[in-house]
């Protein structure tokens, strides 16, 4: 989910609403209008969302400044509001879930479950996965530490993190229960207690493949081992 360009664009697209609405109403309504626009335009990638964003910005610029009592855009907390909109889109826009790439390297692979799979060596250790920013082609690394009941992710060279509890259901299946994060987008997407269901499909020498069920959809991605 490290789509930097997507997040930066979203930070200016909360301006489509009148002064009588509260901040959450603004975010809810904008996410719905944005979803409708990108579906109508058949957008398949965050890089192609510009026209929808620009249309909202042009039509509602004065109203949003009035709502937030701001003289210029610099007076607004653009990043926080943008991430709230992005999180809303990720969770509540079916078109985005069905058509936008996750950005996680290896999720295109459709692997079948390995026979006689043993996952004991994965219950403690350090790992990482790769996320490609669709705007720049840059690959970000998310480091993962699994230790007893802890699942810790570190992003942006360790500047941000997400902490989850891990609950093993059997040898190769587990739940992640979200606890907290200081990552601008992830802390908006998840709330304390949210559960994510995982299944390990393969366990190789250098990496293993996972399957995750989220929002009634199934995704796969590759987690690499750090030796």
Image (cartoon, grey):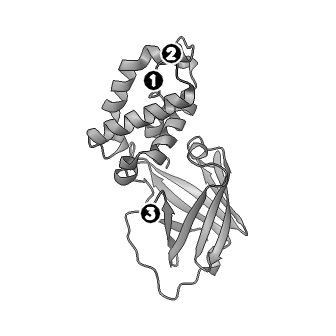
Q: Around disc 3, counting alpha carbons within 10 Å, would you say few (fewer than 14), some (14 to 19), or many (20 or more)?
A: some
Of residue 30 and residue 207, the one placed in the foreground of this image is 30
Horizontal side of 168 relative to 102 (left or right) equals right
Which label's residue is closer to the chain start, 1 or 3?
1
Q: Residues within 10 Å of mark 2 (few under 14, many from 20)?
A: some
Tell me the residue at 64%/80% (across/down): 120
Q: Is residue 177 left or right of residue 95?
A: right
Q: Which numbered dot is residue 15?
A: 1
* Vertical position of residue 67 compared to residue 117: above or below: above
The residue located at (63%, 78%) in the rendering is 121
Spatial CA span between label 1 and label 3: 33 Å
Q: Is label 1 in contact with label 2 (beta carbons under 8 Å)?
A: yes
Q: Which residue is mark 3?
A: 219
Q: Alpha carbon of mark 1 to alpha carbon of mark 2: how far? A: 8 Å
| Residue 200 percent location from the top left of the image | 53, 74
Question: How far across and how far down the image is residue 218, in percent?
Answer: 44, 64
Residue 150: percent from left, percent from top = 71, 63
Residues at circles 1 and 3 in contact by the CB criterion of under 8 Å: no
Mark 3 element type: strand
Residue furthest bottom in the image: 116
Q: Residues within 10 Å of mark 1 (few under 14, many from 20)?
A: many
Please tell me which of labels 2 and 3 falls first in the chain: 2
Q: Which residue is mark 2?
A: 65
What residue do we see at 60% from left, 48% from top?
157
Left or right, residue 120 beside residue 53: right
């Amino acid at each position: 989910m490290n789509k930097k360009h997507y997040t930066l664009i979203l930070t200016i697209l909360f301006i489509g609403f009148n002064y009588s609405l509260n901040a959450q109403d603004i975010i809810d309504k904008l996410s719905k209008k944005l979803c409708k626009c990108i579906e109508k335009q058949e957008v398949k990638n965050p890089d192609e969302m510009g026209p929808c964003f620009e249309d909202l910005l042009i039509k509602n610029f004065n109203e949003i400044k009035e709502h937030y009592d701001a003289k210029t855009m610099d007076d607004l907390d653009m990043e926080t509001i943008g991430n709230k909109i992005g999180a809303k889109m990720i969770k509540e826009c079916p078109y985005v879930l069905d058509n936008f790439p996750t950005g996680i390297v290896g999720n295109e692979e459709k692997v079948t479950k390995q026979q006689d799979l043993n996952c004991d060596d994965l219950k403690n250790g350090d790992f990482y996965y790769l996320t490609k920013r669709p705007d720049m082609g840059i690959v970000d690394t998310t480091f993962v530490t699994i230790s007893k009941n802890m699942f810790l992710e570190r992003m942006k060279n360790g500047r941000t993190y997400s902490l989850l509890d891990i609950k093993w259901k059997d040898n190769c299946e587990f739940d992640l229960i979200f606890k907290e994060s200081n990552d601008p987008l992830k802390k908006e997407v998840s709330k304390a207690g949210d559960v994510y269901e995982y299944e390990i499909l393969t366990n190789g020498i250098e990496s293993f493949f996972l399957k995750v069920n989220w929002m009634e959809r199934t995704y796969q991605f590759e987690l690499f081992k750090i030796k």
